[in-house]
């Protein structure tokens, strides 16, 4: 299928270019007129399925943290954000991180995260400069 150029004939016999119809517009027109898509023969449009309404299956539950009774879904465990461990503005309230011993020098230090293994930069740099090979003791 090719694009089609539409022209207009004047009373004097001259033809004037009016507009161009693209291949896509032609195939859409055929689809609308006869209900068959030439690009996908045998294809029949399927009606969209209706969305199911969610059931309101709230039940009375007891909060794991504070023990209050609330209405919630079966999977819900806490009554609200403070019981879940979140502050009033939605920020997570961190539990204190325990002190650890440095892997390189053995010094006791306070890490910034639970993943901290080294006390300061020299120990960290030494580990990256001379990494231990996996599988060796």
Image: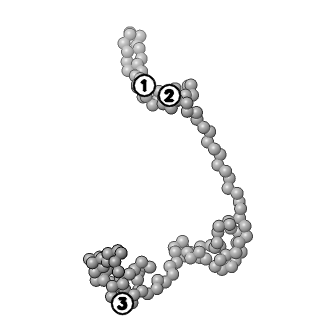
What SS does tag 1 mark?
A: loop
Mark with earlier residue (2, 1): 1
Residue at 63% in and 73% down: 78
Res. 136 visible in picture:
yes
Q: Which residue is mark 3?
A: 107
Residue at 70% in and 69% down: 71
How many residues crowd mark 3 within 10 Å: few (<14), some (14–19), many (20+)? few
Position in image of residue 74 (x %, y %): 68, 66
Q: Are marks 2 and 1 in contact (CB under 8 Å)?
A: yes
Q: Which residue is mark 2?
A: 38
The residue lying furthest to the left in this view is: 129
Res. 18 visible in picture:
no
Position in image of residue 86 (x %, y %): 55, 75
Cα gap from disc 1 to disc 3, whole angstroms: 78 Å
The residue lying furthest to the bottom in this view is: 107
Count every numbered label the image shows and give the total.
3
What SS does tag 2 mark?
A: loop
């Amino acid at each position: 299928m090719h694009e089609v150029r539409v022209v207009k004939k004047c009373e004097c016999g001259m033809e004037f270019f009016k507009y161009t119809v693209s291949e896509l517009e032609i195939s859409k027109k055929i689809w609308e007129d006869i209900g068959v898509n030439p690009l996908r023969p045998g294809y029949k449009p399927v009606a969209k399925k209706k969305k199911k309404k969610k059931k309101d299956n709230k039940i009375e539950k007891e909060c794991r943290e504070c023990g209050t009774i609330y209405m919630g879904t079966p999977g819900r465990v806490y009554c609200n954000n403070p019981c879940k461990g979140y502050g009033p503005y939605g920020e997570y309230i961190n539990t204190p991180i325990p002190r650890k011993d440095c892997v390189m020098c053995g010094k006791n230090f306070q890490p910034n995260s639970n993943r901290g293994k080294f006390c300061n930069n020299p120990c960290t740099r030494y580990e990256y400069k001379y990494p231990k090979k996996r599988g060796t003791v």
